[in-house]
Amino acid sequence: MTSIKIGKLNIKYHYFPSPLAGLTDLPFRRLLDSIGYAGALFTEMISVEGLIRKNPQTLLMIKNFKSDTPKFVQLFGSNPETFKKAVRYINEETDFDGIDLNAGCPVKKVVNKGAGAYLLKDLSKFKEIIRAIRSTTDKAFTVKIRLGFNSVNVFEIAKIVEGEGVDAIIVHFRTKKDGYSKPARWEFAKPLKEKLNIPLIGNGDLFSVETAKEKLKIVDGIMIGRGIVINPSFFKEIETGKREREDIIIKKFIEYMEDFYPEEKWLPRLKAFLRYFSKGKGIPKQRKNELFISKDYSFVKQNAIEIFSNICKDMKL
């Protein structure tokens, strides 16, 4: 496969991890970077209001690290002028390679503030925000959308995105109304791709390597959400057919997490990771429950390492 050109970036790999609140933090992005094969890494969704106020928690969320993988900051908000100020801060105070606009988050508290997926039903404001970002930066610029708000108007949305000079579009193939319950509507991928002159990255229901490879025949790239937390070596598996050892993954994640967070955050963060990473690996339900109800970080850490080390032994890895 040839590289994807997104703005000034020539991106080698066609696979991207989706921004996920509480999951794709710096330790997890470091983990993916260490495994390799990600086209770019995206922060969790960052509030432009929090950024311009220099909220300590927001600044922690955009803390960066050195890697060879391009890195994007994903922004959400509702005010074009606030976006300009936030983008200037990204330009001047950080070393991110690109900016992604979230216009797809269906969470009620985000939508009620006129942000996320709300922008898909207020296309004049959507256009204003895109224009504000594009006029303020020459960094690579992507927009993540859904098929529409209550109904499908993705072709109209995509025309605005391309017309305003965005470098690539990421489409979650559900409407806001669909939430996450209905199957992703990948039937829109091919006709949308045919109308676009910028890269199309598709997202939604990509839980297996086989499905991902099939969709890559239709779109320029794929974005994986929950599936990348369940299997952090998903991209490696697509590219090489091989997986990273589970015991190595859990040890690396713990190392990066302990390096980044204060001690009181370790237990809830490790549990959040394990709720996904433990799926589909044949771990007895009782053993998992012991981890999730425990209030002892050392117990959870040691048992998690032991569980995944045993999985690797059983598989003779």
Image (cartoon, rainbow, N blue to C red):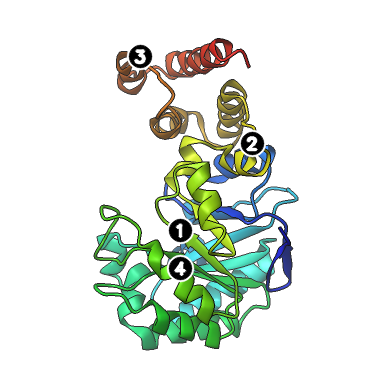
Question: Residue beneath label 2, please?
Answer: 241
Q: What residue type is labelled 2?
A: Gly
Closer to the camera in the image, 155 or 247: 155
- Residue drawn at point x = 69 percent, y = 57 percent: 70
Question: Mark 3 sits on what residue?
Answer: 287
> Which x, y percent locates residue 315?
56, 15
Q: Report the mark closest to the observer, 1 or 4.
A: 4
Q: Mark 4 points at which residue?
A: 189
Q: How far apart are marks 1 and 2 (CA)?
A: 21 Å
Q: Dot 1 surroundings within 10 Å: few (below 14), some, or many (20 or more)? A: many
Identity of the amino acid at label 4? Ala
Q: Earlier in the sequence, mark 3 or mark 2?
A: 2
Residue 118 placement: quadrant: bottom left
Residue 300 visible in the current orientation:
yes
- Name the kind of residue labelled 3 in the image: Arg
Toward the viewer: 17 or 64?
17
User: Cα distance, mark 3 to mark 4?
Assistant: 41 Å
Q: What element carries label 2?
A: loop
Left or right: 112 in relation to 201: left
